[in-house]
Every structure is written in C-alpha cells, then in structure tokens.
Image (cartoon, helix red, strand yellow):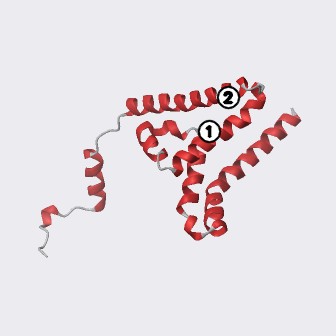
Amino acid sequence: MAAVPEELKITAEEYRELARKEKPPPPLLFNALTAFFSGGAVCLLGQVIQNGYIAFGFSPEEAANPTVVTVIFIASLLTGLGLFDHLANLTGAGTAVPVTGFANSLTAAALEFKKEGLVLGIGSKMFSQAGSVILFGVVTAFVVGLISALF
C-alpha cells in the first residue's frame, strides 16, 4: 500500500469540518410543506373515517375509539405490506402523526423479530418499543388527572 503524502493527512476534526462545509443544506421549506400537507392528509383520512362511523349511527364521542383503531389498522397493514416506508419516504414527517407512527414502529418491530417466536420475538420486541410510550402516557395521564382533581 502506498504511503499517503504528509500534505494530504488531516485529522478527524478537520475532515468533519470539511464534510460539514460541503454538505448541501436541507430543503427546509419543501420538507415543512410536505410534512404539513401529508400530516393533514392523514388527519383528513381520520376525519373521513370518523364521519363514516357517525353516518352508521355512532355519536361523535362514540366514533372516536373505532376511528383510532381503524387508523392503527391501516398503518399496521401498510407496514406489513411494506408500503408504509415508501409512503413515509415520499411524505416525510407527515406520516409521523402519533397514531400512525406508533402503529408503524410496533408493527415493524413485530415483523422484524417474528422468527424468534410469539413471546420472545413479537411480544417482547414489540413492547420494548411501546414500553416507554405507555409508561410516559400513564404517568402523564396520572399527573394531569391529579392536577384536574386538585383544581
């Protein structure tokens, strides 16, 4: 292997600085607009689904839970079919609307570890992803409930 001339040797810090200077800036406006409209489209889909449940005789309050379950099912189905990632690449952060993003992360973890079995694969890996969300959701609900009860 040929020796590198002394003038071409740079430190890791110098390389990082050169790479930072050469990296093109992200298209922030395009990314923000894409996320805004795709997130709005996900929410619009949820509203259409809720209106469908209302048309079947549910009250708006009663239609909320089946709407969330349906959106979770759609996101999980798209993940299982391998379409969610393609959609997320096109739409950016818009698909990270909490319900669809959470469903995608759980389903992807379950699919990734399904060969390890139902309990040690799907169950443990899927809920290792969900554990922190469930924990902080429960703690936050408790704190908000406590504040509501006191005031």
Mark 1–mark 2 CB contact (< 8 Å) = no
Q: Position of residue 19 (x, y in %)?
A: 27, 51
> Can you tell which mark lies on residue 124?
none
* Residue drawn at point x = 52 percent, y = 49 percent: 79
Residue assigned mark 2 = 50
Residue assigned mark 1 = 71
Considering only order in the chain, which callout, 2 or 1, is on the residue closer to the N terminus?
2
Label 2 Cα crowd, 10 Å radius (few <14 / some 14-19 / many 20+): many
Q: Position of residue 1 (x, y in %)?
A: 14, 76
* Residue drawn at point x = 62 percent, y = 38 percent: 71
**Residue type of the residue flagged with mark 2:** Gln
* Residue drawn at point x = 48 percent, y = 28 percent: 37
**On screen, residue 25 above or below 104:** above
**On screen, residue 2 above or below 149:** below
Which quarter of the figure has residue 86? top left
Which quarter of the figure has residue 72? top right
